């Protein structure tokens, strides 16, 4: 999968969790941009992404994520 | 639909004991106290004597007693989790029988909870000790999720917890099922009595299959013995059907059934008649049948009857009935009598308990000590991290990079403070930070945040005291505070007002507050400051 494909799958997950069918995300999107992105939805996001891509994030990796771009890069790294 | 009031993070004890207006106005019907093994702070230590350990148990139990007692003024049901087992056992198998073992300790606390629940009429135990064993501790507790989000149980376990809880709530409101309606052939015994005859059906202990049917009958019998009504709904000749319960190995007898429908009418008609005969509504019935067609007919024609998909294998029937908690009860009638006797003894017992007469007294009992000092290099990462993830107690929700924080920490035009808090339960770590920007004789508070885990502990006052002290030392005359409204920081919308600031201006998005330093008197009387 290339980054665009991963972005589009991740975008579907975001749309599903935030219940917004036309939500668009990009590298710079972070929790300040999405009102509903609280700690509970963050867990939902992480869990859905882990399930979708069949990967597991390690503890420290998640703490340092600042935006969607970093999240995508981490997914790419894990899929290698 | 139920409406929920949720306490702030880890505020269950404070909210219960000292109440708050929002909770009072909410007028709850049910309190649910979701505590788990992670809420136990003082486990036995390796050099504790038996007396020490007994004291620890008494202290822990007394904490919950005081919660239940304080909540009794709301006159509603209290559902309290007991404790799941700790995921690690330092002593291995010894952990369960050494008084120093955590497993042993948890078991004793659970015994204590059971004792109280037997005595206190409106206290119900949500048995997460059983539930976690049932799904497995490994699946129940997710370590990363705990470290990351302070979830006391895994995502997978949450629906299990909620479902289990719903059974208790159903029972409290009298919505549990009352009648178990059973099919006969291949449900109460193996085989078809009309074809195989009495000697041909499988019941008893001779074969594996017969044994499974016997166990199922025994289960139904046990339900009957504790007050569940039994009925039969079977496509059979009445005489054949009745004869099945004359089998010498049969646990159930014809007389165990309050209603017995064995004929060739469609089952949904029979079940309607059963409900009318017993004089209960359809939604009090649970129908068990091994035949998916029959289940389909009944559930489509009588949607309020519970028709679990038990499959076709008798070995799993009981599990389906159990897991759905259809027949959950919160008391048996004998116990009800005992409970009434409790109330008299209760008043006295509760009066003897150690109580706090005020919130202030409680806070003092925590023995809090704080370090409140300007930013130091070792903490810059933590402060940056807090500035980026704190949403609730955050007046401006201004995000900073490590570079910005580092620059500010050494800039003379800024006043910075971090706060660390220790109490008798442990070290809370670095939980507060503020940044003030100096312009002439005024200090503007650009950032003030605190972790939710130390809310309402007096740390707000302690931080402000320290902030003011530094401002005065720098010859400043006033402090200006800003509240920028976000969706998540409502809890601090009136913080500055509570701390004695005067409103300068406000609109729907923000408010600006001013504090005259000459007029300021120190407010913290609870927390000891230990800046060396």
Image (cartoon, helix red, strand yellow):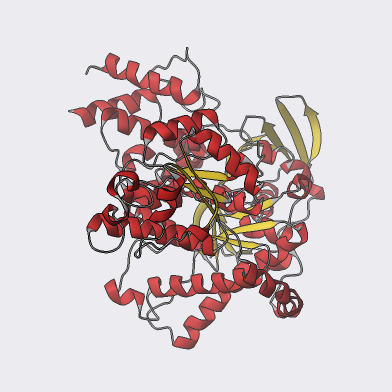
In the image, farthest residue toward the top: A22
Q: Quadrant of the N terminus of chain B?
A: top right
Residue found at x 60% / y 39% = B394
Q: Which of the 4 image quarters holds residue B235?
A: top left
In the image, farthest residue toward the front: B239
Residue B451, horizontal then vertical, whole percent: 55, 47
In the image, farthest residue toward the left: A80
Q: Is residue B502 above or below residue A11?
A: below
Residue found at x 72% / y 56% = B76
Q: Mark yes or no: residue B382 visible.
A: yes
Q: Is residue B352 left or right of residue A7?
A: right
Q: Is residue A67 above or below residue B448?
A: above
Residue B413, horizontal then vertical, whole percent: 58, 37
User: Depth check: B280 or B438 in front?
Assistant: B280
Q: Which of the 4 image quarters holds residue B493?
A: top right
Q: How many marks?
A: 0
Residue B276, horizontal then vertical, whole percent: 64, 42
Residue found at x 32% / y 49% = B314
Q: Is residue B518 left or right of residue A12?
A: right
Residue found at x 54% / y 74% = B112
User: Depth check: B16 or B188 in front?
Assistant: B188
């Amino acid at each position: 999968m290339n980054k665009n494909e991963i972005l589009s799958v991740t975008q579907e997950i975001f749309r599903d969790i935030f219940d917004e069918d036309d939500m668009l995300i990009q590298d710079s999107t972070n929790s300040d941009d999405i009102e509903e992105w609280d700690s509970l939805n963050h867990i939902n996001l992480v869990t859905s992404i882990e399930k979708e891509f069949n990967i597991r994030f390690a503890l420290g990796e998640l703490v340092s994520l600042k935006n969607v771009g970093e999240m995508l890069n981490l997914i790419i790294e894990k899929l290698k | 639909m139920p409406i929920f009031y949720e306490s702030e993070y880890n505020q269950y004890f404070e909210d219960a004991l000292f109440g708050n207006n929002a909770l009072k106005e909410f007028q709850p019907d049910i309190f649910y106290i979701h505590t788990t093994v992670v809420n136990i702070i003082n486990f036995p230590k390796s050099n504790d004597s038996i007396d020490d350990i007994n004291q620890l148990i008494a202290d822990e139990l007394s904490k919950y007693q005081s919660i239940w007692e304080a909540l009794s003024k709301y006159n509603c049901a209290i559902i309290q989790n007991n404790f799941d087992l700790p995921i690690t056992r330092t002593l291995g198998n010894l952990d369960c029988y050494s008084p120093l073992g955590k497993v042993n300790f948890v078991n004793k606390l659970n015994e204590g909870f059971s004792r109280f629940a037997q005595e206190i009429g409106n206290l119900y135990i949500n048995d997460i000790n059983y539930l976690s064993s049932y799904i497995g501790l490994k699946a129940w507790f997710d370590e990363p999720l705990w470290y990351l989000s302070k979830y006391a149980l895994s995502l997978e376990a949450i629906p299990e917890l909620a479902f289990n809880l719903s059974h208790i709530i159903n029972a409290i409101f009298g919505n549990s099922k009352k009648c178990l309606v059973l099919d006969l052939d291949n449900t109460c015994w193996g085989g078809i009595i009309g074809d195989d005859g009495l000697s041909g059906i499988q019941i008893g202990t001779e074969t594996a299959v017969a044994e499974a049917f016997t166990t199922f009958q025994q289960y139904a019998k046990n339900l009957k013995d504790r007050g569940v009504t039994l009925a039969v709904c079977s496509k059979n000749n009445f005489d054949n059907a009745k004869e099945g319960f004359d089998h010498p190995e049969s646990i159930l007898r014809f007389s165990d059934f309050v209603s017995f429908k064995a004929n060739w009418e469609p089952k949904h008609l029979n079940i309607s008649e059963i409900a009318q005969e017993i004089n209960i509504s359809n939604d009090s019935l649970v129908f068990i049948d091994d035949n998916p067609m029959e289940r389909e007919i009944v559930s489509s024609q009588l949607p309020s009857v519970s028709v679990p998909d038990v499959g076709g294998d008798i070995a799993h029937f009981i599990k389906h009935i159990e897991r759905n908690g259809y027949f959950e009860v919160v008391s048996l009638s004998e116990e009800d009598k005992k409970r009434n006797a409790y109330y008299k003894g209760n008043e006295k017992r509760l009066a003897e308990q150690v109580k706090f007469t005020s919130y202030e007294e409680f806070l003092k009992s925590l023995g809090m000590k704080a370090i409140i000092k300007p930013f130091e290099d070792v903490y810059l990462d933590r402060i940056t991290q807090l500035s980026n993830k704190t949403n609730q107690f955050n007046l401006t929700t201004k995000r900073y990079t490590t570079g910005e924080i580092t620059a500010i920490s050494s800039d003379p035009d800024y006043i910075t403070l971090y706060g660390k808090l220790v109490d008798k339960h442990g070290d809370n770590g670095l939980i507060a930070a503020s940044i003030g920007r100096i312009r002439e004789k005024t200090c503007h508070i650009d950032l003030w945040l605190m972790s939710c885990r130390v809310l309402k502990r007096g740390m707000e006052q302690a931080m402000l005291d320290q902030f003011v002290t530094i401002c005065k030392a720098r010859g400043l005359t006033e402090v200006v505070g800003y509240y920028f409204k976000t969706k998540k920081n409502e809890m601090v919308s009136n913080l500055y007002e509570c701390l004695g600031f005067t409103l300068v201006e406000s609109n729907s998005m923000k408010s600006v507050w001013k504090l005259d330093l000459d007029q300021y008197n120190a407010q913290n009387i609870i927390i000891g400051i230990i800046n060396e």
